[in-house]
Image: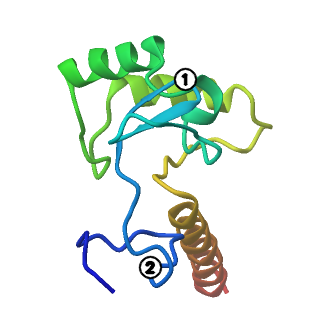
Amino acid sequence: MSKSSPIWHPFTQHAVLQEMTKITGGSGAYLTKADGEKLLDAIASWWVVTHGHCHPHVIGAIKEQADKLDQVIFAGHTHEPAERLAQQLLSCTPDGLDYVFFSDSGSTSVEVALKMALGYWHHLARTASASS
């Protein structure tokens, strides 16, 4: 296999597809290859499935936020857009669901949900044995 990229691309059979398709741009539902050919983006990851590539409203919102604050870790920190979004999400949930965990991917969200559930039951068992 010839080495054309040092990246291990997920969901890719590297033995079959030895060279990745180079994408140089995107607009609406289409990606543009390095040679100018347009491809319909049938994968449509993240927000692209709803709004398309390079949607002016999405790009504007990203730029506006990045001009103020590009990133902050939630370990002991917060910021107003996250707090506002959490409140909006909670307004749609049943009583008793009082917290929001933001995740960067589905696998991370499952991992954290399992850790939260294990922590809950561990804490419940310790509380029960301490009160006996």
Work out whether residue 128 or residue 104 is closer to the camera in this orientation and state it.
104
Say which residue appears at 59% left-offset and 23% top-offset: 51
Count of numbered circles in the view: 2
Cα gap from disc 1 to disc 2, whole angstroms = 28 Å
Query: Where is residue 13 shown, x and y percent of the image?
Result: 52, 78
Q: Where is residue 28, by image quadrant?
A: top right
The residue type indicated by label 2 comes to His
Dot 1 amino acid type: Gly
User: Residue 118 in the image: x percent, y percent?
Assistant: 60, 78
- Viewer-proximal residue among 8 and 1: 1
Quadrant of the rendering where the N terminus is positioned:
bottom left
Residue that appears at 48% across and 36% down:
31
Is 64 placed left or right of 13 in the picture?
left
Q: Position of residue 52 (x, y in %)?
A: 56, 26
Q: Which residue is mark 1?
A: 28
* Nearest to the observer: residue 120 or residue 54: 54
Residue 3 placement: quadrant:
bottom left
> If the image is split into quadrants, where does the C terminus sit?
bottom right
Q: Please tell me the numbered disc located at residue 14.
A: 2
Location of residue 37 by image quarter = top left
Tell me: 9 left or right of 29: left
**Picture disc at residue 103:** none
Q: Judge the density around disc 2: few (<14), some (14-19), many (≥20) Cα neighbours within 10 Å.
A: few
